[in-house]
Image (spheres, grey):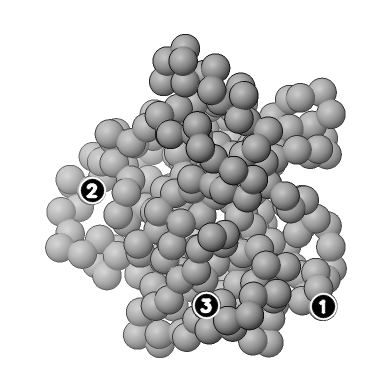
Amino acid sequence: MNESWMQKWEEQKDVLVCPTDLESYFTSEEILSQKMEVMEIGNVSLPSGKVIVRDPLVYLNAGEKPYFIETPKGDFPVKIAVVKSEEWGDRYAVAKVQFTDEKPVIYREALLGNEDIEEVGEGDYFGFAVDAGLACITDVTVLPAFDKFLTEINADNIYDDYFAGLFAQSYKDHPDNQRDLGDWINWMIPNTSYHIPIFASGFGDGAYPVYFAYDAQDQISGLYIQFIDIELALSDDDEEEYEEENDDDNNEPEDFVFLKD
């Protein structure tokens, strides 16, 4: 990130705004006749406020770059807005980290500071990639501990050999809004106090946007991950793009959808 990029971002930051009031997913009982439920999954550890949102099984390592906007430091509650659809099943539509109780008035996309933002238009987003059907929220200063854990456990397949059992136990302990293989955990890295919430990513693999919410005083009040745009999903002519078949033998959904063209 340099001065030239920052100037471009100042010019474009109001273009990279979420058109949906994401907080409404946490305050509405229904959205377009789809029942909504809010699930609390514990706290996330953000010791430096330099936030990273990634697929934890594919793209999380000590070389990852955090978002250039920094958040408050500390441990903060994580909530997930679940859309309870007869067609899709229970799906995680939006996840959020709540920094304050102030109401968001605008949601600007979280960026790394190296994106090509000159040609972005309304409705565009960069997002983060998911290839293993999971997402997580963490802090850049936590990554060395995560890498150390991976080295010490030395598993051939970190999901099958380690995380699958934790997800299965999560389902046993909290069966609501989860499939029987488990859809979320709030994992504490062994021998640390760092909590990394890990959860299923909407319809599975794809690219999903992350937004910082700002209140009326232009202060960051939360971080939101949008997995499902319910209005867009229900209005799409090709229903197959938004349907995903469960794989009973695999925690990772088979199909995926990009939220916007």
Give residue 241's mark.
Answer: 3
Label 1 SS? loop
Which numbered disc, 3 or 2, marks the residue closer to the eye?
A: 3
Q: Quadrant of the N terminus?
A: top left
Instruction: Establish if 56 lies above or below 214.
Output: below
Residue sitting at 50 percent across and 63 percent down? 258
Q: Tell which of 69 and 50 is nearer to you.
A: 69
| Residue 98: % across, % down | 69, 41
The local crowd at label 1, few if under 14, some if 14 to 19, many if 20 or more residues have their Cα within 10 Å, is: few
Q: Label 3, label 2: how many angstroms apart (C-alpha)?
A: 35 Å
- Relative to 256, 59 lies left or right: left
234 to 64, vertically: above or below? below
SS for dot 3: helix
Image position, residue 72 (x, y; %): 62, 26
**Residue 212 location, quadrant:** top right
Mark 3 or mark 2, which has the lower sequence index? 2
Name the residue beneath numbered marker 1: 33
Query: Disc 3 to disc 1, how far (Cα)?
Result: 20 Å
- Disc 2: which residue: 150
Contact flag, marks 3 and 2 (Cβ < 8 Å) = no
Query: Residue type at mark 2?
Result: Leu
Going 17% across and 45% down the picture, which residue do you hit?
151
Q: Earlier in the sequence, mark 3 or mark 1?
A: 1
